[in-house]
């Protein structure tokens, strides 16, 4: 049985912990230098996972943008872009979304059992649709990705996905970027939802790196003994 992937959570949030506001226009919580850092992290991963809500709301491409990094992946015998992964409880995904229509990498959809047949019919050949359980179990998803050869998984959101991986004790590392602004809207999406988190008052995370990147700050936390595996251990700064 293959080991589950090393799982890295990546998130940008406001000072008060929000991922976005409710204006309908995407809130940029980073800057060009940090976007390039995220691109470098993506290039070092085998797969990138986002929730279905993120696909519907943000329409992300989830591609490696740098031509040099894409070329380096190919030189290592890898695809130019990581495998794309999403999780959905009800389906309702558009095969024309950028997640499915851009890049040549494999696309995997882990779907709740009751919506499996309909989701396969809707997506057709745009993705491989897999039974993730009812409800979808991120432990099952992680185990299956390990069986498929994914060694390093990057989870980019949204809040539901961050919460599920954290409360399941599956996150090995958190890269959290804090932007210098407040949202202050309880209707806006947050970094995490309520839950029973293994990292708590009795089991504090290890702050492994602090880095200023222009007007944002990167906080890198070790969440498990596997921290730094397959990606190098950061030095606190």
Image (cartoon, helix red, strand yellow):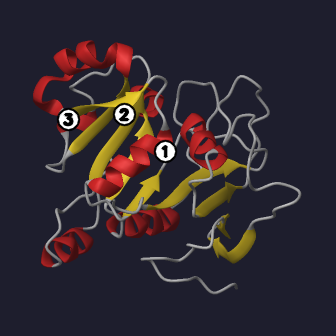
Disc on res. 234 = none
Residue 35 drawn at (x, y percent):
46, 61
Query: Residue 197 versus residue 216: which sits nearer the camera?
Result: 197
Image height check: is 120 above or below 136? above
Between circles 2 and 1, the one closer to the viewer is: 1
**Label 2 to label 3, Cα distance in Å?**
19 Å
Numbered disc 2: secondary structure: loop
Residues at circles 1 and 3 in contact by the CB criterion of under 8 Å: no
User: Where the N terminus falls, by quadrant?
Assistant: bottom left
Q: Which residue is drawn at 68% across and 28% down?
A: 188
- x 39%, y 70%: residue: 40
The residue that label 3 is drawn on is: 128
Give residue 103's position: percent from left, percent from top: 18, 48
Q: Mark 2 vs mark 1: which is more N-terminal?
A: 2
Q: Describe residue 237's horizontal placement relative to residue 134 as left or right.
A: right
Determine the residue located farthest toward the front in the rendered image. Answer: 1
Categorize mark 2 by other alpha carbons within 10 Å: few (<14), some (14-19), many (20+).
some
- Labels 1 and 3: the sequence-earlier one: 3
> Where is residue 234 shown, x and y percent of the image?
58, 82
The residue wearing badge 2 is 59
Residue at the location (63% across, 41% down)?
A: 163
Q: How far apart are marks 1 and 3 (CA)?
A: 19 Å
Taking depth in this image into account, of 225 and 8 the one nearest to the observer is 225
Q: Is residue 61 visible?
A: no
Q: How crowded is mark 1: few (under 14 residues within 10 Å), some or many (20 or more)?
A: some
The residue that mark 1 highlights is 139
How many other residues sit within 10 Å of disc 3, few (<14), some (14-19) or many (≥20)? some
Q: Distance between the residues labelled 2 and 1?
A: 25 Å
Q: Quadrant of residue 208?
A: bottom right
- Numbered disc in front, either 2 or 3: 3
């Amino acid at each position: 049985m293959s080991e589950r992937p090393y799982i890295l959570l990546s998130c940008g949030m406001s000072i008060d912990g929000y991922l976005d506001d409710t204006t309908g226009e995407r809130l940029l919580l980073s800057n060009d230098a940090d976007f390039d850092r995220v691109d470098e992290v993506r290039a070092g991963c085998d797969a990138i996972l986002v929730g279905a809500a993120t696909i519907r709301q943000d329409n992300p491409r989830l591609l490696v943008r740098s031509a040099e990094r894409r070329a380096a992946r190919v030189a290592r015998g890898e695809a130019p872009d990581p495998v794309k992964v999403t999780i959905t409880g009800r389906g309702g995904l558009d095969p024309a979304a950028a997640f499915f229509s851009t890049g040549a990498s494999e696309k995997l959809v882990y779907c709740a059992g009751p919506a499996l047949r309909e989701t396969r019919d809707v997506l057709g050949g745009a993705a491989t649709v897999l039974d993730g359980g009812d409800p979808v179990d991120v432990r099952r998803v992680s185990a299956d990705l390990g069986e498929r050869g994914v060694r390093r998984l990057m989870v980019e959101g949204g809040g539901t996905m961050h919460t599920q991986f954290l409360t399941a004790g599956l996150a090995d590392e958190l890269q959290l970027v804090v932007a210098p602004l407040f949202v202050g809207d309880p209707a806006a999406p947050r970094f995490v939802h309520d839950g029973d988190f293994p990292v708590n008052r009795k089991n504090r995370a290890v702050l492994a790196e602090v880095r200023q990147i222009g007007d944002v700050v990167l906080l890198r936390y070790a969440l498990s003994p596997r921290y730094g595996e397959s990606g190098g251990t950061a030095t606190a700064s």
